[in-house]
Image (cartoon, rainbow, N blue to C red):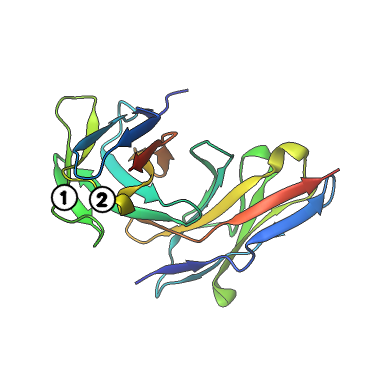
Amino acid sequence: EPEVTQTPSHQVTQMGQEVILRCVPISNHLYFYWYRQILGQKVEFLVSFYNNEISEKSEIFDDQFSVERPDGSNFTLKIRSTKLEDSAMYFCASKGRYEQYFGPGTRLTVT
Amino acid sequence: AQSVTQPDIHITVSEGASLELRCNYSYGATPYLFWYVQSPGQGLQLLLKYFSGDTLVQGIKGFEAEFKRSQSSFNLRKPSVHWSDAAEYFCAVGVNFGNEKLTFGTGTRLTIIP
């Protein structure tokens, strides 16, 4: 069964550093998403991406964040200058026709 | 804006007992409703979804959920839980078919006791 994959599973970085989180969505899906879950809190929408552009973003997704689909398979989330409060689990999701399928997540720890 | 409320933060049930997890949503029209399960250290797995039609939907692992428009609810049920059902359960709502973002509830942690 096809699945969404994410790398790395855990990333530790220092405050102010840039990080890139990578996702490989399900191959025939057209809609792509990033969500995050701060420890102990609910899952929050960050951004959706369709037809090679952002279709919607939340207030969390400020200028420090960017997304890209550099080739036909990868979907990346970049945080330019990480803050302590960016520490969270980041989930990628992709959607074909009906439902979103989530990856296993990348745990980002900012020190 | 849409919102989801899961009033039970933590529920404990005995193995073999029945289960009902509550979910209430706020949205002006008919939303698209989902239940996801998250095991420790794992991602989110879709249990079931409601888009339209029959208000009682069946999902994986023996779960079902019923959409009640009059109560703005989408409660998840299972007649007999197994120890492997211990996990965090999230209700979510989407409002634009196609490129909908999901709004999640705060989750209900389910503990199973022997």
Of residues B111 and B103, the one drawn nearer to the viewer in this rendering: B111
Amino acid beneath label 1 = Gln
Chain-order first, disc 1 or disc 2:
1
Q: Residue at x 48, y 38 (%)?
A: B43
Mark drawn on residue A83? 2
Q: Is residue B101 above or below residue B59?
A: below
The residue pinned by badge 1 equals A64
Residue B3 visible somewhere in the drawing: yes
User: Residue B81: where, in percent of width, then height?
Assistant: 77, 45
Residues at badges 1 and 2 in contact (C-beta under 8 Å)?
Answer: yes
User: Residue B71: where, in percent of width, then height?
Assistant: 59, 75
Judged left or right of residue A48, residue B81 is right
The C terminus of chain B, quarter of image? top right
Q: Residue at x 40, y 29 (%)?
A: A9
Q: Chain of mark 1?
A: A
Amino acid beneath label 2 = Lys
Q: Nearer the viewer, mark 1 or mark 2?
A: 2
Specify few, some or many for label 2: CA neighbours under 10 Å numbering under 14, 14-19, or 20 or more: some
Judged left or right of residue B99, residue B50 is right
